[in-house]
Image (cartoon, rainbow, N blue to C red):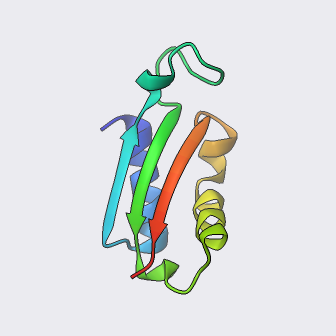
């Protein structure tokens, strides 16, 4: 797991206490594309399941995640694919 993937995992774990969380660095799939960094760690896929998402709309779940990761999304992380489920 990359450093940024660990950071994302830690922040989301603290915020939502998920039952499952998987963060995958997909930067190698975007090499040469806009937003790709030479060292990678710019494109991620997230799968997360947490009770905190129960009753929230898809948009509300994404907004909550984006709020927690605002610093990363404003900096090093160019793209984050989110699959978020409630219990």
Quarter of the picture containing the N terminus is: top left
Rendered image quadrant of residue 62: bottom right
Q: Position of residue 2 (x, y in %)?
A: 35, 35
Say above or below: 73 vs 19.
above
Q: Residue at x 62, y 77 (%)?
A: 57
**Foreground: 5 or 80?**
80
Residue closer to the observer: 30 or 68? 30
**Going 53% across and 31% down the picture, which residue do you hit?**
42
Residue pushed farthest bottom? 55
Horizontal side, residue 11 vs residue 1: left or right = right
Q: Position of residue 60 (x, y in %)?
A: 65, 72
- Residue 55 percent coordinates (x, y): 55, 86
Query: At which x and y percent is residue 61?
Result: 58, 70
Asked if residue 82 is positioned above or below residue 3 in the image, the reply reads below
Residue drawn at point x = 64 percent, y = 44 percent: 73
Residue 52 as seen in the image, left or right of residue 79: left
Residue at the farthest right position: 74
Q: Is 68 placed above or below 51 here?
A: above
- Total of numbered circles in the picture? 0
At x 57%, y 62%, the residue is 65
Q: Where 57 sits versus 81, above or below?
A: below
The quarter in which the C terminus is drawn is bottom left
Quadrant hosting residue 5:
top left
């Amino acid at each position: 797991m990359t450093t940024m993937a660990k950071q994302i995992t830690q922040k989301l774990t603290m915020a939502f206490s998920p039952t499952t969380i998987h963060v995958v660095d997909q930067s190698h799939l975007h090499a040469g594309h806009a937003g790709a960094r030479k060292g990678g760690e710019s494109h991620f896929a997230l799968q997360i399941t947490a009770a905190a998402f129960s009753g929230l709309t898809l948009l509300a779940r994404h907004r909550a995640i984006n709020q927690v990761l605002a610093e990363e999304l404003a900096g090093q992380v160019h793209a984050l694919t989110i699959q978020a489920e409630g219990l």
